[in-house]
Image (spheres, helix red, strand yellow):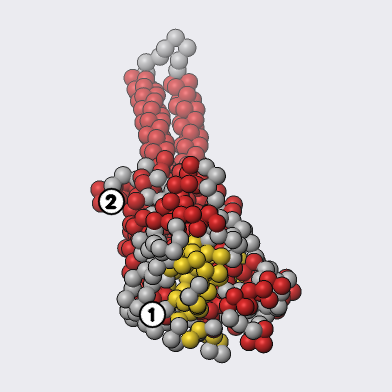
Amino acid sequence: MYTQENGFYIAHGPNGPISILGNMANRHGLIAGATGTGKTVTLQVIAESFCKAGVPCFMADMKGDLSGVSQPGQMSRFIEKRLPEFGMKQEDLTFEGCPVRFYDVFGEQGIPMRSTIGEMGPDLMGRILGLNDTQTGVLNILYRILDEKGILLDDVKDLRSALDWLSKHAKEYTTQYGNVAPASIGAIQRALLHLDNQGADKFFGIPSFDIQDLMDTRDGKGVLSVLAADKLMLQPKLYSTFLLWLLSELYSTLPEVGDLEKPKLVFFFDEAHMLFEDTSKALTDKIEQVIRLIRSKGVGIFFISQLPTDIPDVILGQLGNRVQHALRAYTPRDQKAVKVAAETFRANPDFKTEDAILELETGEALVSFLDEKGAPSVVERAKILFPLSQIGAITEGQRLDIMNANRDINNKYKEAEDRESVFEVFSREAEAEAQAAEEAAASKEAEKEEKAKKKEKGFWDKVWKSVVTALTGTLATILGKTVSDAVTGKKGKNTSVKDAAGRAVKNATTAATRQIVRDVLGNVVKGK
């Protein structure tokens, strides 16, 4: 449906075909409308038109409906009724599917898409974990320290290990980076546990997804990368932060190309309001910057949401290509949203925009695309084209066949790897520290035992010295007295020279015996 003159044919109005100009397709767009008014089909029509022109697209599939873009459509009463309105005939139609790759963050319904925690960055990780500014600041400190050490941060166990390490070494970095409170680290660990329980371990890791794989073409057609998001939607912050990471990677990776004849890639962000819920001003400013500048990389972004008011004004003002489906005005808030939506269009004198938004039928929309000068065209009430691919979900067997057909890229990402990163590095450091502590404790114990031995030896040396001195003195006294008595002939009451000599011999024998005992005991103590 794409032609060089008319651009990407999307809708048909009172004055004929309405197209998105190729060189304006990277100026971003908005598809809005209440549930059930045809937003998903409009997304499919736009993506299909880009595909046929050789422009690859990335889109999130919330309910599985977009998987049908991979299969040929078929004639229906609805299409048959629309043909005259579009100036077409049945023989002019060729129903066909588009080349598709299915992706899944959890690796269940498509090719796994992973990112490392290091690549995600502390601010995006803080958003996923629901951290406050102080806790996010601690993550920034941790990332900075790891960068300085040249240590990779890949998966959940890495971050858990790094936080444990930081809690033990926080005082070493207080002067340089500021205080790291144990309470903040504890809060991050708890948030990380909650995220891990939701399956984040399957998303964070390597091999990390290569953005260039979104840019492929096949047989002249752009490959449509369809992300299975039904399970991911249950974790809104993970979903929106993951898509924001993809945009950031595209922005930082792709070269500047300016306005091309047609974009290099078109990115569809469904349920766009999730991107801006509970988002700090700093992160909103970052999103606005990426959206504003990424168009110079040849990337166009379409936000899909129920209300234009779901998107901040500063970003809404950059969405030049608009498709507005019907809105309902049941409440004052709804009525205000209708008025705001009407005011974002360039008025058409043929009808009142605010009234038309409430009257639109399914498959009908208010359409305004940028003209050759980049200015919004006058809004038109138009009917969106029908896709030539299947509307609705495919079977599990068809999905499996497509995954098997993409075997090369599937094998590239199928098996998770575990290279040397924080966990391995800090585990080795912990083992080395534990071994060093064990050796230091053993050395201290040995030194303590040596001191005890020396002390004990000194004690027994003193004891034996005292014993020897006492025995020697006693023996000298006895011998001296006995000899003196013998020489002088002095006799006691029951004493004689013979008796004295006997006692001397006895005492000498006893002393000799004690000397033998002392020598034996001395040898025992020395051996001890």
Mark 1 or mark 2, earlier in chain: 1
Identity of the residue drawn at 55% across and 56% down? 359
Amino acid at the residue labelled 1:
Asn
Closer to the camera: disc 1 or disc 2? 1
Task: Determine the residue located farthest toward the top in the rendered image.
Answer: 493
Amino acid at the residue labelled 2:
Tyr
Give the quarter of the figure containing the N terminus: bottom right
Question: How many marks can you see?
Answer: 2
Nearest the eye: 348 or 345: 348
Q: Is residue 417 visible?
A: no
Identity of the residue drawn at 52% across and 69% down? 382
Identity of the residue drawn at 65% across and 65% down? 64
Mark carried by residue 23: 1
Crowding at dot 2, Cα within 10 Å, few <14 / some 14-19 / many 20+, comes out as: some
The picture places residue 228, in percent across and down from the top left corner, at 60, 66
Q: Is residue 318 visible?
A: yes
Crowding at dot 1, Cα within 10 Å, few <14 / some 14-19 / many 20+, comes out as: some
In the rendered view, tell whether residue 228 sits above or below residue 509.
below
Nearest the eye: 279 or 528: 279
- Measure how far apart labels 1 and 2 are at the Cα level: 47 Å
In the rendered view, tell whether residue 283 sits above or below residue 212.
above
- Kindly identify which residue carries mark 2: 177
The picture places residue 22, in percent across and down from the top left corner, at 42, 80
Identity of the residue drawn at 56% across and 65% down? 364
Mark carried by residue 519: none
